[in-house]
Image (spheres, rainbow, N blue to C red):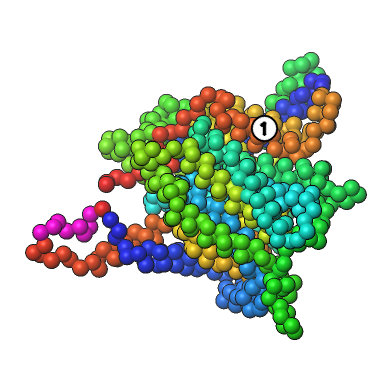
Amino acid sequence: MDLLTLLQLLDSTLRLATPLLLACLAGLFSERAGIFDIGLEGKMLAAAFLSAAIAAVTGSVWLGLLAGIFASLLLSAIHGLASITFRGNQLISGVAINFLAAGLTVVIAQSWFAEGGRTPQLAGAARFNPITLPGAEALRDVPVLGPIYYELISGHTIIVYLALLIVPITAWVLFSTRFGLRLRAVGENPAAVDTAGISVVGLRFAAVAICGVLCGIAGAYLATALQAGFTKDMSAGRGYIALAALIFAKWRPVYCLWACLLFGFLQAIALRSDLIERVLQFNIQSQLLDALPYILTVVILAGFVGKAIPPRAGGEPYVKER
Amino acid sequence: MDVMPKWAEVILVPLISLLLAAVLSALVILAIGENPWDALKLMVDGALGSTYGWGYTLYYATNFIFTGLAVAIAFHARMFNIGGEGQAVLGGLGVALVCLYIPFPHWSLALITASVGAALFGAAWAFIPAILQAKRGSHIVITTIMFNFIAAALLNYLLVGALKPAGSMEPATGKFPETTHLPSFQDMFSFGEATLFRGAPANISFFVAIAACIALWALIWRTRLGYEIRAYGHSESAAKYAGISPTKIIVVSLLISGGLAGMMAINNVQGEAERLVLNAVEGAGFIGIAVALMGRSHPLGVFLAAILFGFLYQGGAELALWTSIPRELIVVIQALVILFTGALDNMVRMPLERFFLSRRKPPKPDAKSTPAVGTN
């Protein structure tokens, strides 16, 4: 395998890891505040649909992005209502949200565009287009570093850079601000936060809302950057892989980045079965490669990465008085 | 303390939840420019208006009884088995192997052996997540979701490779031999001139599903194991204190759960398709979640909820056929049912509890005991 092929592989790793990373950080905020969210998948899907639909209608990808965030926030509100206000089962609420998104996106897409449950193809300003970083063309011929800069670092959509930027921001918010301290506290010991006179409900809703915004960006990225339009079930289990990455990362922002890059890399090599054949000298059926991220997740969950301890109050509704 | 009378708990709460889900579904239909009342009439007509419609409704219901029971038994142990889909896929594999490679003299033997094969394969697929939950604390929800994806990939791999008959282009096994074909309702209930259930896929496995309901009821409420499962579900620490092994309960309840989900395959693989195809399960594993929630994890409730979802499924297919409403509307209804009967349960329950509390007779003033009203 030469340098260029490797760079192409890493380049698509970065592109495929971006939605995982955004969803993973979304889950991080939610779960750190004690709200389990297996509805990441549904929120991404809803955001993917509405962003593609609005981008197709208005021709502006930025309006699409806003619409995607709105769709995701709406589902977040349902999740918050069910799991915070009415103290319902957070896992069941997440499952319901996933199905709601899977069904509604197709039903609405069919009645809106009548193209068999998809949106029209997006092009031009209705999509996020790759950005060539300054100097990439000029430095292209510099040995080793030039191709790395040109192929790998430059030439992504703005969401990719945004996602990478959100990692240190998340780390800073969670570990260096008062809001972050309270957010983490509410996921570990909500009673203590309540005693200090801070609203548990408010903090948890804030966390769920941040989760909604990040999932919205992730979904919009799927439909308007990674692909050109919405197709049925296009999130394809990414929300679940993001959850797995979150556990793998032990609920820490920077680890999330590495975990998502790893899963992105697995998805990238699954797309390049010709490469595997060339490197390993034998053919692996693509179905097995598709299953690889999931198998790896189970192996990781089985405890080969040491103990992953979730936030203590995760999944439990907070009851103020007994 | 029970605030509500039993009948309200068992009937009123699910009914109001269902009504809320129905109203929202009607709004969705209205929003996409169709008439909800016409849609309902079409659904009732298509699903219940003929023995043909009933034949489909009960066929779907059979699938949902199995997957609903699977989720229900796990709920009793306070486990959330979201992997019914994958376990049903593996059950299909078990059925296919039994039917393709064992020569049977009669369908009854084939049915028994295939049931065992389906249950074993389904249970095996639930075993790894169960043991990981019990021994390593890996969250059952995440691992069973992963196993759904792995099952789909595994089946895909086998159907384009080892199990595909030579010369065939389609990713499916060959047709099962004649002696493994199960009697359909048409074979069973047509006498003389009258042909009932013509061409509908409902078959004898519907009665196997009813037997499974009764067996599960007996297991949960009439055996020691059932008691242990319920005790563990109510309080892990109390169960541990009473000498009940959490590992055993988690593993055993999930094995039963996986086995039941797998047994769905005798209906859809052996009874209907008579060969194993890709995506034979069609989301029935997930509908089991809605069915178990609506049926309050009780076998009778699961049975009734499964019939309701069978009706929705068949009615939804009719809608897709005659109107512009796509089949995915059923997924929306399913989501709303899960939302209202599962996650938003308290939204319905809290006002009802307040209502029943306010209607309580105040305790007699001369009563020595402290009044129990309003404390819980």
Magenta span main SS:
loop
- Residue A139 lies in quadrant: top right
| Label 1 Cα neighbours within 10 Å, binned few <14 / some 14-19 / many ≥20 | many
Quadrant housing the N terminus of chain B = bottom left
Residue ranking furthest to the bottom:
B193
The kind of secondary structure element at disc 1 is helix
Reply yes or no: does residue B370 show up in magenta: yes
Q: Nearer the viewer, residue B92 or B350?
A: B92
Q: Nearer the viewer, residue B290 or B159?
A: B159
Q: Is residue A276 above or below residue B179?
A: above
**Left or right of B168 on screen, residue B82:** left
**Left or right of A239 on screen, residue B195:** right
Which range is magenta?
B368-375
Residue in the image at 36% along x and 40% along y: B242
Residue in the image at 38% along x and 41% along y: B239
Query: Could you say where residue A105 lies in the image, as x and y percent from the top left?
Result: 62, 56
Q: Dot 1 corresponds to which residue?
A: A264
Residue A139 appears anywhere in the view: no
